[in-house]
Image (spheres, rainbow, N blue to C red):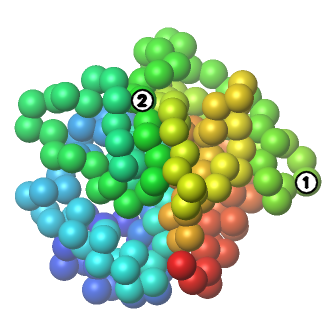
Amino acid sequence: MCPLHQSAEKEACHRLAAGPLYSPAPSAYGRQLTPLSIGDALGQFHAAGGALWGTCAGAILLARDIAGDSDVPGLPPALGMLDIAVQRNAYGRQVDSFTAPLEVQGLETPFEAFFIRAPVITRVGEAAEVLAEYRGQPVLVRQGRLLASTFHPELSGDDRLHRLFLDLLTKQD
């Protein structure tokens, strides 16, 4: 994976994955996008064939529409690259965090997902495909070389979703 902290670093990430995008607070990520031109860099990276994966807060950044407490002063708009709508912190506060086994399309056995102040995907557009649900709500979606999860797969110790993401590098829109 290739974290992008400054737009100049995008050159070092040619044909690598610029993800997963995750942060303890989506507003912290959002505030970094504009001053460092990371939002533009991510858009250019994806347009040039790169794959992006937004996990939890990263899913919020990739979403086209955001509901909930997204009216934070000074928070720039999300990237709007993925045809989904999300509601921030929909499962509650940090104390309400939980794990749940998910049936994921393409995986033979359930994936243990960690939901920490997770958003809920409230709408999935025609261009996006639901890969997993929790209690009837989409929690893992794909659109071309974009992947978004409302949970933290990096905490599971299970690399199957990371391998699925790496497969997106060869996928064409």
Query: Residue lying farthest right?
Result: 108
Q: Is residue 98 left or right of residue 85?
A: right
Is residue 68 shown above or below 62? Answer: above
Say which of 124 and 158 sits in front: 124
Query: Residue 54, image x and y in percent?
Result: 46, 53
Any part of residue 23 in sight: no
Choose top left, top right, bottom left or bottom right for residue 41: bottom left
Choose top left, top right, bottom left or bottom right for residue 127: bottom right
Sequence-wise, which precedes: disc 1 or disc 2? 2
Q: Secondary structure at mark 1?
A: loop
- Say what amino acid the circle numbered 2 marks: Gln
Badge 1: residue crowd in 10 Å (few <14, some 14–19, many ≥20): few
Q: Residue at x 58, y 30 (%)?
A: 115
Q: Residue at x 46, y 54 (%)?
A: 83
Badge 2: residue crowd in 10 Å (few <14, some 14–19, many ≥20): many
- Say what amino acid the circle numbered 1 marks: Glu
Q: Residue at x 71, y 29 (%)?
A: 136
Q: Which residue is mark 2?
A: 87
Q: Secondary structure at mark 2?
A: strand
Indicate which label's residue lies in the foreground, 1 or 2. Answer: 2
Choose top left, top right, bottom left or bottom right for residue 106: bottom right
Q: Is residue 133 left or right of residue 40?
A: right
Any part of residue 78 in sight: yes
Query: Residue 164, image x and y in percent?
Result: 69, 65
Is residue 13 shown above or below 63? Answer: below
Query: Residue 56, image x and y in percent?
Result: 47, 41
The Cα atoms of the two marked residues, 1 and 2, are separated by: 30 Å
